[in-house]
Image (cartoon, grey):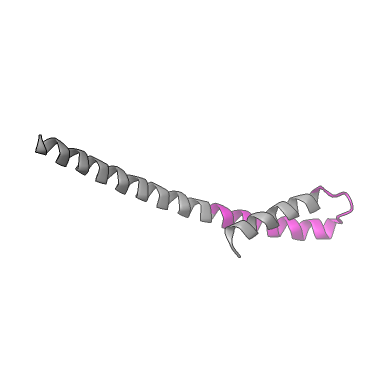
Amino acid sequence: MSFESDLKRMEEITDLLKNEETGLEESIKLYEEASALGKKLTKTLTEIQRKVERVTTDDEMELETADMDEEETF
């Protein structure tokens, strides 16, 4: 499943757990599913954050190098 579909499923589970008609057994199964999805979503977000930080760091290094090159030409 994609991040977006996992997030949508998490929202569905939340709605089902809020519903008073959802029984205890079903609520427990839903809670277990939500817990696993939460871990998966957190892991995905952490990986994305690391990628963004690497790209940002690489971009900043390139900008610094470009600035230094411009200073040398004057």
Residue drawn at the location 61% of the way across and 57% of the way down: 4
Q: Position of residue 20 (x, y in %)?
A: 88, 49
Q: Which residues are magenta?
A: 18-42
Looking at the image, residue 41 lies above or below residue 74: below
Looking at the image, residue 40 lies above or below residue 73: below
User: In the picture, which quadrant includes the C terminus?
Assistant: top left
Residue drawn at the location 21% of the way across and 43% of the way down: 66
Q: Residue at the right extreme?
A: 21
Residue drawn at the location 62% of the way across and 53% of the way down: 38
Q: Position of residue 33 (x, y in %)?
A: 69, 60
Q: Residue at the bottom extreme?
A: 1
* Camera-nearest residue between 41 and 57: 57
Quarter where residue 73 is shown: top left
Count of picture labels: 0
| Side (left or right) of 46 relative to 34 | left
Q: Is residue 55 magenta?
A: no
Q: Is residue 22 magenta?
A: yes
Quarter where residue 67 is shown: top left
